[in-house]
Amino acid sequence: MSEVCPKCGLNKELCVCETIAKKEQVIKIRVVKRKFGKLITTIEGIDKKDIDLRDLSKQLKHKLACGGTVKEDTIELQGDHAQKAKHALIALGFAPESVSIG
Ligand SMILES: [Zn+2]
């Protein structure tokens, strides 16, 4: 059974809502230090109404070969992956000019 997009009503394979939405996101990538000095890369600014954050985090974790989680509107990846995460997001269809680090 194929899923139908709730926005446009098209079959998910034909739907381009997420493709369009990806170009509209303003994404901020930050590397923060957590307890015990562990580094976490956070990816903020993606609207979870437009983008499936869990699915996106799964793809990022696979591409970067790291662990991670989704908290509210933020994807958290274990380790310092700022540059790699930016490249991975662009490869996934996000606009290069709207992905900033820092
Ligand atoms: Zn759609």
Image: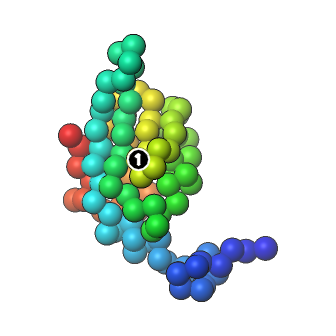
Q: Residue furthest bottom?
A: 9
* In the displayed structure image, the side of residue 3 where residue 78 appears, left or right: left
Q: Is residue 90 visible?
A: no
Q: Residue at x 51, y 36 (%)?
A: 68
Above-or-below relation of 67 to 48: above
Report crowding for label 1: few under 14, some 14 to 19, many 20 or more residues within 10 A (C-alpha): many
Q: Which residue is mark 1?
A: 74
Q: Amino acid at mark 1?
A: Thr
**What colour scheme has been applied to the protein in the rendered image?**
rainbow
Q: Quadrant of the N terminus?
A: bottom right
Front-most of residues 48 and 1: 48
Determine the residue located farthest toward the right in the rendered image: 1
Residue 54 in sight in this render = yes
Residue 6 image position (x, y, % from top left)? 58, 79
From the top left corner, tell me how far across and down residue 91 is, in percent. 41, 55
Q: Residue at the top extreme?
A: 36
Vertical side of 17 occupied by 95: above or below: above
Query: Residue, x 32% and y 24% (percent of image)?
Result: 33
Residue at point 65%, 79% (across, down): 4
Asked whether 1 or 75 is in front, the reply is 75
Q: Is mark 1 within 8 Å of ligand 1?
A: no
Task: Give the SS element for disc 1.
Answer: strand
- How many numbered discs, if any? 1
Q: Residue at x 44, y 57 (%)?
A: 92
Q: Is residue 96 above or below residue 28?
A: below
Q: Quadrant of residue 76?
A: top left
Q: Quadrant of the C terminus?
A: top left
Q: Looking at the rendering, which quadrant does residue 23 occupy?
A: bottom left
